[in-house]
Each structure stands twice: as structure tokens, then as C-alpha cells.
Image (tube, rainbow, N blue to C red):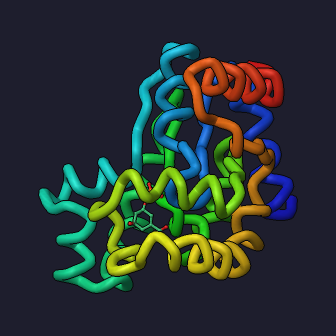
Amino acid sequence: MQPREVDAMRVRINKVRQMVRVILIGYMGAGKTTVGKALAAELGVPFYDLDWFITTRYRRSVPEIFAERGEEGFRDLEHRMLHEAAEFEDIVLSCGGGTPCFYDNMEYMNSLADTIYLKATPEVLAMHLRMGKGKRPLLEGKSSEELEDFIQQMLVEREPFYKKAKYTLDVSLLDSSLKIQESVRLIREMLGI
Ligand code: S3P
């Protein structure tokens, strides 16, 4: 049997057992954590945020890890922690915006979970990110005006990875709790859970 067929079979077996393993991916500011928490609460399964997992384990914030180990060091920890977190049964996991774009992380996630790309326009992402300044080393020093262009350029590099997700949900209009609930409903419909 080919590796792809083995992966497909693992996912099918999990479905028969009604196991929920959903991984949300997408650019910074797309709402992965917000939607993930709401989805997990509705399904009654734990929610994990990969950045939280990393910062709790290493007792350092993401900017501190970047400062001490560089981006390469952060990506290595992220890769290792992904392998721990994604093995849990019955979880909703939200990844960092860069997680799918390094190592074989995207293939790994697809091999054992339902992966969903939360897609939003650069305008919407920039609007959300302007509110959360200081937490994201890759955006450090960008003015409000530069932010949207920067996101647009980065999405050109990142979208080929994001598009490998099994499902895509447009979350550009996620600006109220009603719409968060609507996204949760759409995800449940897509996945049949
Ligand atoms: C990153 C996204 C961040 C965090 C780190 C790097 C990225 O997570 O992992 O700052 O490369 O896009 P969020 O997407 O949760 O902000």
C-alpha cells in the first residue's frame, strides 16, 4: 500500500471511531484561536494552541524564543511540539501562521487530521493584526501602512502551503460572535461532525 493510501485509511478509521482531530491553519490574525476555541467548546473536546504549547513547555514567550534562538530555532521547536500536540485524540489544534510552511509539517498534519485553511484577505488580516501589536516578531517594526503590503507578499509565498489543507473556509467577514458561530457551523457541516 502507498503511504498516501495508508494516511487516507488512518483518517477514515478515525472517522469511523468518531474521533475529532481538527487542525486550523492560516495567516496570523485570521482568527484560528477564536474559531478553534468556539469549535472545541461546541464539540466538547479540548482546544490547544501550538504557540501556547511551545511557550508553556519552554517557559518563554514567542518573541523571547525568536530573540534567543532565531527563527530557525523557533521552527525547530514548533516542528517538534507539533508532533506532540497533533498526536492527541479528540482535539482542535490551532497552529502558528508559519507552521505549515516548514519541514514536512503540512503533509504530517494532513496525514492524521482534518486540516482547515482559514482564509482572509490582506485587508482583514492587517486590520486584526494592528490590534495585537508586539506579540509577533515577524511583524516587528512594520508601520500600519507597510503591514498590508507585507502580508500580501508573504501570502504569495505561504498560500501554496496553506492550499494543501483538506478544506478552506473564508473567514474574511468574521467580525462578530454571530459570524464565529456561523464559521463553526460551516466547519461542522464540511466535516460532518
Ligand atoms: C508566526 C505566527 C505566530 C507565531 C510566530 C510566527 C508566523 O502565530 O507562531 O510569531 O510565522 O506566521 P499566530 O499565527 O497564532 O499569530
Q: Residue furthest left?
A: 59
Location of residue 52 in the rendering, given as x and y in whole percent from the top left corner: 30, 48
Total number of numbered labels? 0
x and y percentages locating residue 154 in the rendered image: 62, 78
Q: Please, is residue 144 above or below residue 127 in the view?
A: below
Residue 7 is situated, as x and y percent measured from the top left of the image, at: 75, 52
Answer whether residue 191 is visible to the viewer in this image.
Answer: yes
Foreground residue among 60 and 30: 30
- Res 23 → quadrant: top right
> In the rendered image, which quarter is residue 150 located in?
bottom right
Q: Quadrant of residue 2?
A: bottom right
Residue at x-position 59% and y-position 34%? 175
- Residue at the spot 58% in from the left edge and 26% down from the top edge: 176
Residue at 55%, 76% (x, y): give it.
Answer: 102
Q: Residue at x 76, y 44 (%)?
A: 170
Ligand 1 quadrant in view = bottom left
Q: Nearer the viewer, residue 164 or 135?
A: 135
> Is residue 113 shown above or below 13?
below
Instruction: Specify the quadrant that holds the C terminus.
Output: top right
Quadrant of the drawing holding the N terminus: bottom right
Residue 20 in the image: above or below residue 152: above
Q: Does residue 41 appear left or right of residue 137 in this picture? A: right
Q: Position of residue 92 (x, y in %)?
A: 53, 34
